[in-house]
Structure formats: structure tokens, C-alpha cells
């Protein structure tokens, strides 16, 4: 039976990335509270293709995923990437896993418990044996407009917003830690279950903590700068404006020399204040 | 060349609806202010298929649409439906056209002008020569929570919501008229352009007009009941809650005997109060 | 603390449906092969609201869901509906649960195993103590065009299609059973993992079993008519045409007197042939 | 009235991008055939925000867009960017415009005419007075699998795919030109209207021109390398596999030194063959 994919290609074009995308797969991830949680992932698996091969072998991506089993966490992702490179004779391998992630949360006054859902992403790639790992999390929050509050005799427009945060770090950071950083940077965190006393608390707390979309990304940036594990960050925020039919958007990325300064800080002769100055 | 579609089918199953869907097409629609506006429609065209035919002829739907030209309004839709039935030898024909619809709107204080976008839908179907026509419009609005306002010392959570309204009427109703009815039923209408003075006005107006999602659909229902052109309505509202990661939803449909009462009201011996009782 | 929702409403408008929508929640469902599977649901919970109440109590929906626990199956849904009606003092309750559903599937020749994903839906509502339950399943399949095959010297255009099937039945039908019915009605079923031998088989099988979108819905209808458990069905198919940028669509619903004929068939004096005649 | 946005910020964080997103706006663009076409755009407008300002002024983005008028083409985009920088006191300005774009297309045999729709994107940004302009186009096409054809006794699986192409150039390239390049690189282009003779032609043409997703991006790359106007390209292709429920994906980007080689070629002492070698 012919193997078209292995035929020689003469166009002289290396394909940067090739593979499967939109694969739906049940997985188990580790969480801070319960050790593991079951969820459903959307997976992309990509490798490079040297210019002299006609095609990659798509079925092998799925085989690698199947053989790995359903438990996926940062520690065993290098194995998947290694297998992808080996089975597909590739230099470069990339794995992208996106999944709903649940955290049990207590309402602020009544302590009534509900499940909050977030979207988490693992972006892992490797060239040779160095793995680049980016942890991503999308956190819905409330934003209350400082301008609207300042100029209005009563009330202030507020809305649901969404923060997409991506982080590279020098050691494990839990998804829950990133969620906390984002929620603390907003006017209010969201809940699936709020009784009347909680709703009063949440309303007043948001009114007392107004943030522009610019404040939101900056508040997150300041917190990440203070966390010595973080080597790189990208923070996007989008407000689904309650008074407009479009969004307000802001993005902050760590400065180009951030990782360098970060590593410099580890030296004992630097003072902690230094870090706070960003 | 074989005509598979015209072959005899023996399964004895009439197909209720068959045709094309997701056709993207530039159209011109009439509006109240400028007479016409250019927009882009997503079109579905469906007919029934008697049990004895194997298939319909999909290309003829597109031919009917092309031959009709780009100007589409309520008055010429019967021609399209008639052509669909003729060319496809069908009893039933259905046309669905969805498009962004723009209204120039002035900010409430500065009168600064901006374009607001809505989504409009024409749903037309015919059996023999009676056309059933439903006009649909999706209107984004602000809702401010009456409970949050009542129980909180300051502020009130609010958010963008979306109202989907569908109406059957005994004479033409303009899209702009339905938009006004929905916007007046909400805490505040939306704008694409608001200066600071406008933002103050909008914030305070929303605070002074709190509505639950239930109030919103009821306010629209009360207004539609008072409009003697309306024979049937369905009102859905969804609030993208600023304090939750889920939506609040409400739906009201006109009572089963609504059209009948409506027609009865046209008689001079009925009092207007009667209508208010709904 | 004020209870705005319980205030008296004077507009005289009963709200047909009100509640929460888009709630994301981890659930456990029963399957034919492994007894249970973990997945993630999107949930809507709705009740009616009598004309004299201003609002429903949104937090109680989430409480009912939380208290129920994560295992959801047809047998325990009446409890959820009953609790919704009790806690919200409603006559009508409606629960809608949509979730990815996984089936382990073997490739047709090599028997290599992969996970196939589908989307399942439970639609349950109750007025008083009668529950109406609709089981829905979305099944992606291949369709190969009979016309293209008949007129072309070689090849035939084919594409991914999607069948949305909804069924009411007089006893439990497994999700897997509905999936099989749809897959057997198509040109070919889909797989997540196919080796070269399998791809040859699938290609030839699809070429040998061409179906129009009309054939697909009719094939499913014929199979459902022969299944005595089925009391009502609605079958929609959409082909994402490989030669067009729009879809071909067909829909068949069971005839109005279908349930009646169905029940009549249970009597011993009816012959099986009767059923085949539809 | 307070101007919160102009307050001094002390966090020391420069915001890379801030502005409005998801603005829906009717526009007029120039096309090759009819000079202009009316369509509907989704717009994002972003600037940078120095670390010492608390916020940007969101309403000014919409004012700039409104004042510009509806006709948008490559030549007048620098004016919009200039106004954004001036009105918002920014160094950097970014404009993103995405819109459906229509091309009238004749069927290959009968010459029947239909409208084909594509999605075009203008990505323009400026720092000081240099504008960076990227033209993007999404082109749906047919791909027929070379492996499936080679190993099967009859037929070959094929499907709709989508190519996203982005190009930087040293002079104007028409949207229609990029569309042609992509369509010629595929198994077959798509049509909105095909009669039976056309369907036979399209089916056989696709069967005679099988392409993997890797072939598709390479074919486009080879054509772009031969076009001396092109300074940079990024080509993504996704096949909505007819035999799987996931996609096959490939991406090629121009090599890092591509622009340099490109400019070198303009010198008269280089031979044209050089270009073909890539």
C-alpha cells in the first residue's frame, strides 16, 4: 500500500507546523484542592515537517495521545512531546490543551458553596530537549467604571469582563494561584451562587473598587512582578461594556528584559524593594 | 447526464424542509431614515419534498436568489417564495434572512452621533398563497438589577443584556419601531459614542430605571399589547450577569387567544381599557 | 433586607419561562459500555412565573443543582424538576443539559481504538407530575453525493455533515443506540484514529454508500419507525458542502399521528408489516 | 466634571495596547471588478498608553472612525492611524478591520454566475510615521486527500478547508489576486452556484488535483515566492476532515531572511531563476 506522505517533496518549502487540531478528549488534571478533576479538553498537536517530505502522518498524533492515557499535567507533558518528535521524526513538537477548569467557591457572606468555571490552557513546545511551557487561564470578573462612578450622582456602570493571562515561570504555579491574582485585581470576582446578603456585599465591594480595563491589566502586572517565579507574562482584558455594543480592551506584556531582571533578582545582594519597583 | 434527484423514492418519507443554509449574500434593505441601507445577509431557503422524489435541486435556490436582485423588503419576499415553489415544484417554501442593521443614534446630552448595530431577521413562509411573515430583531440593552439596588448601600450591579423579539403584524412595522419599544423597556439603551456628560446621564438613568430580566420582557409585552398592529409576539431576554458567569433568561409569548382578541378590538364597540387588561 | 422579587406585579403578564442559562457544571452520566463517564455540561433551568410576582429567585436554581450532586441520568431528572417547582413555587419546570459524550470506537480494519466525541442533550420538562423527556444527540458523519458520483467519470464530492436527532420514547433508549442509527444511515461514520488500511476501507465504503442530505434524514426516519420504543422524532441534517461555501440542509419530523399509530401497534392484532409502511 | 482617565498613574506599568474592539460598522471597500463594494466591518482600534496616565479616552476612537467616513482603503488608513495617535497622544496606533468580501464568480462549464464570499482583514499599525500593513484573506477551498486516492480502489475523501493568508508587500496587491493564488493551490475552488455539468467538472478536477494540507500551504508559498511584491507571508490551512471529527492543520511562514532576499532580487544583476529556487 502506497505511502504518499513519505514521498520526496521538491518544492523546497519547510512546513513550520503541521498536525491535528480540534481533537476533543476527556482528561484528568491535577488541582490544588482535590488533587484531580475530570474535564474535557480540546487538543492541538503539531510538529514541523522538513522540506523533503511530502506529508506528516496524522494518525500518529492520535496514537501518541491515546497511548499516553488521560491524566495530563505539567510533569508528564515532556513525554508526550518526546513521543511526538520520535514517532513523527520531527525536530519541533507543540501541544496545546484547552479545558474548562472548576473551582469550588464560597459566597462572601453566607459561605454558600458553588462551582465556578474557568478556561485553562497548556501551551507546550520543544525543540531538542528544552521545553517551553506557557500556562494560560481565562478568568471572568466584574469591572466597575471609575469614570462613571466619579461623574455620576448615583450608580456606576459595570459589566462582566474577561481576563486572559499567560505566564512562563521557573517553577510550578497552580492554576488557582493565577485565578486569585486576576480576581483580586478586578472590581469583584464572580460566583455561581449568591444569596441576598452576598449580593449586597458584592455590589458594594465592586462600587468601592472601580477599575478601568487599563487598571485591571496593570493590577495583574504589579502582582506578577512581585512573584519571583514568573519569567514572562501577557495579560489581556476585555470588558463587555454595559453601555456600548462593543468591548473595551487592554493588553500588557512583560518588558523585553523582564526575565533577565528576574534572574538577576535571585542574587542575595539585591533588596526585595527592588522587585516592587518593577 | 443522470438526474439522481428526480428518481423515484420508495421509502415513503416526506421531507418537511430541505434546501440551502448559511448562504452569505450582500443585500439592500429599506430603513425609516435613509430609505435604503447596504448590509450583508445570511440566508436559508427551504422547501418541502414529497415522499416520491429522491432529492431537491439545490442549485435552483441560489438561482432564484440571484435572479431576484439585491433589494429585499417585505413587499417583494412573496415573489421569492413563489419562485421557490414554482422552480422546485414544492407546496411549502421558507425564506430566512438575517443581517446586521444600523441606526444612526445621537448621544443623550451632547447629541454626538454614532452608528448602533442590531441584528434583524425576516422569517417568511408560504403554503399555497398565504404568506406567514415574522419580523425579528435582536436589541442589546443595559439592565440594572432592582434587587441589588434595593439592598445595597451604594451602587447596583448592571450588565449588557440582549432581547430577541419576534412579531407578526397585520400591517408593516418598521424595524426601528421594534428597537424603540425594546430600548424604552430597558434600564438604558446602548450607544456607540458617549462623551462624559452622556455617560453621567446614562449611568444615572439606568440607576433610576432598574429592571429584572422578567421586567424587561413584561415591559416589552405591555407595549406590544397596546399596539393594534401586533398579532403575535415572542420576547426573549438574556442578561450576561456581571456578578455571575452564567445568564439570567426570561421569555414571554403572546397568549394563545391573543390574535383573536386583537381582531375583536378593531370593532368600535370595544373600549380601550379592554386592551390594557391584556 | 428587601425581597424585590416577591413584590406584587401589576402588569398582568405571566412569564412563560424564566431562570438561568449557560451554567457550566461537571457531571457524571451513565453510558452503555462503562456504566459512567465524566463530562462537562452546559445547563439551563427554567420555570414559569405567575403574573402577580415581580421576579423569580435565581439563586435557588443553582442551589437545586448543587444539592442534587453530579450524577445525572434520566431516572433522577424528575427529582430535579420536582425540587425546582417546589423551591420556586412554579407549575412548570424545564431542565436542559448539553454535554460532550465519548464513545470508544475501533477502526474498521486494524481495530485500532480511538475516542469519538458527540454532543448529547437532555431536554426535560414537567407540568404537574408528567415529565416530558426528549433525548438529543448530534452525530458527525460523512456524506458522499449520489449526483456527483453518478455524473462524474471519477471521484465524488463528499464532506463532513452533522445530524441532530431528537427522540421521545416510551422506555429508555441509550445514547449509543441513537448514534448507531445515525451512523448506519450515512455514507460513513467518523473515527478519531484510522490507519492506512482503515482509510482505504472508509473511502471505498463511503463511495459505495452515497447519500443526499435528504437520504440521510430519511434513512434515520425509516430506522426510527421500525423501533417500537420511539414515540416522536425530529431529524435534522446539515452538510458542510465541500464544493460550496454554504450548507445543504434537510429536516424530517414524525407525522402528527405517529405516536397514536405507535401505540396502536402495540396491540397484538396488528401485523409487523404495518410498521414498515410507515 | 472629573477626568479620571487623565489622572497620574503610579504603578509604573506601560499598557502596550488599549482601545475598543468588536465595533460593528458599515464600510465601503474598493474591489478590482466594480471599484467599490458595500460591506460590514468588525473593527478594533488600539493605541499604547504611557505608564503615567491612568486611562485612555475610549470615545475618541469612535469619533475618529465616524469622522473618517465609510470608505476605507489602504491609501487612507494612514490618516486614521495618524488621527488616533494625535487625538489620544499615543506613539503607537493599531487598526484592525475584518469584513465579508464578495466576488462574482462564473461556474466552470455553464458560466452561471454566483456570488462567492470570503473574509478579508486589514491589519495596520504605525509607530511614528512608518505604517506596517498586513493584508489578510480567508479562502474556503476543497481538498482531496492524495493518500486516500492512492490507496483506494475508487473514490477519495475530500472536504471543505479554509486557508488564512496574511501578506506584507512593497506595493498594492488586490484581495482578488490573493484569492486566486489560494484557489489555484487547492484541489478545487468553491462556487455558490453549480449546475450538473459544473458539478461533474468540479468533481473530476478535484480528483485530478489531490492535495494534503501540507501541499496546500506549500503551493501557496511557491506562488508567493514568485511574486516580487511580497515581502512577508504567513499561510495557515485547516481541513475540516470528512472522515474525522477533528481538523488537519498546516502553517508556513516566510523564512526570516525572506524580505532581505526579496529586496536583493530587485537588483538587475539577479536572474529570475533565482526566485524560483525560493
Image: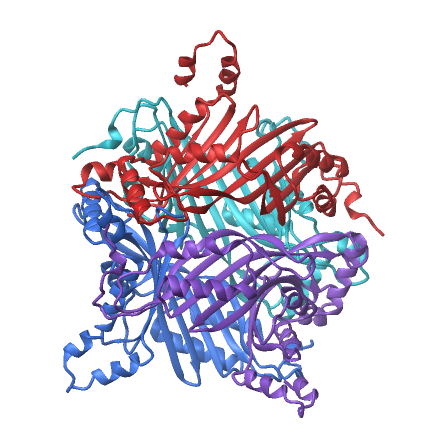
Chain colours: A blue, B red, C cyan, D purple
- Provide residue B40's location: percent of width, then percent of height: 58, 48
Would residue C169 be visible to someone looking at this image? no
Picture coordinates of residue C273 (x, y %)? 69, 34
Residue at the extreme top: B269
Residue A85 appears in the picture as rendered: yes
User: Percent position (x, y) of residue C255?
Assistant: 62, 31
Of residues C162 and D31, which is closer to you in this image?
A: D31
Q: Nearer the viewer, residue A65 or A67?
A: A65
Tell me which residue sits at (15%, 77%) in the image.
A273
Residue C85 vs A167, above or below: the answer is above
Is residue B230 shown above or below C110?
above
Q: Residue at x 44, y 55 (%)?
A: D22
Q: Using the image as rendered, state which of residue A226 and residue C101 is in the foreground.
A: A226
In the shown orientation, is residue B133 left or right of residue B270?
A: right
| Number of residue marks | 0
A131 in relation to C191, above or below: below
Position of the C terminus of chain C by quadrant: top right
Q: Quadrant of residue D54?
A: bottom left
Which residue is pictured at 33% across the width and 31% down the height? C85
Could you tell me which quadrant the N terminus of chain C lies in? Answer: top left
Q: In the figure, is residue A60 to the left or right of C126?
A: right
| Residue A46 spot, x, y in % from top left | 50, 73
Amino acid at each position: 500500500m502506497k505511502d504518499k506522505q513519505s514521498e520526496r517533496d521538491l518544492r523546497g518549502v519547510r512546513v513550520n507546523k503541521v498536525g491535528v487540531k480540534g481533537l476533543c478528549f476527556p482528561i484528568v488534571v491535577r488541582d490544588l484542592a482535590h488533587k484531580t478533576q475530570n474535564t474535557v479538553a480540546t487538543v492541538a498537536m503539531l510538529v514541523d515537517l522538513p522540506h523533503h517530505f511530502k506529508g506528516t502522518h496524522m494518525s500518529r498524533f492520535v496514537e501518541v495521545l491515546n497511548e499516553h492515557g488521560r491524566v495530563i499535567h505539567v510533569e508528564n507533558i515532556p513525554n508526550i512531546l518526546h513521543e511526538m518528535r520520535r514517532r513523527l521524526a520531527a525536530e519541533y513538537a507543540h501541544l496545546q490543551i484547552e479545558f474548562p477548569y472548576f473551582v469550588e467557591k464560597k459566597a462572601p457572606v453566607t459561605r454558600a458553596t458553588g462551582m465556578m468555571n474557568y478556561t485553562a490552557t497548556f501551551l507546550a513546545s520543544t525543540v531538542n530537549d528544552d521545553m517551553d511551557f506557557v500556562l494560560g487561564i481565562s478568568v471572568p470578573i466584574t469591572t466597575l467604571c471609575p469614570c462613571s462612578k466619579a461623574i455620576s450622582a448615583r450608580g456606576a456602570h459595570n459589566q462582566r469582563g474577561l481576563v486572559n493571562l499567560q505566564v512562563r515561570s521557573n517553577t510550578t504555579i497552580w492554576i488557582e494561584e493565577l485565578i486569585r491574582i486576576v480576581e483580586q485585581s478586578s472590581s469583584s470576582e464572580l460566583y455561581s451562587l449568591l444569596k441576598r446578603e452576598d449580593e449586597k456585599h458584592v455590589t458594594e465591594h465592586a462600587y468601592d473598587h472601580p477599575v478601568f480595563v487599563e487598571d485591571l491589566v496593570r493590577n495583574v502586572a504589579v502582582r506578577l512582578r512581585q512573584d519571583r517565579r514568573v519569567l514572562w507574562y501577557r495579560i489581556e482584558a476585555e470588558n463587555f461594556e454595559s453601555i456600548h455594543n462593543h468591548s473595551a480592551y487592554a493588553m500588557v506584556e512583560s518588558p523585553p528584559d523582564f526575565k533577565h531582571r528576574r534572574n538577576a533578582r535571585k542574587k542575595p545582594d539585591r533588596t526585595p524593594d527592588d522587585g516592587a519597583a518593577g
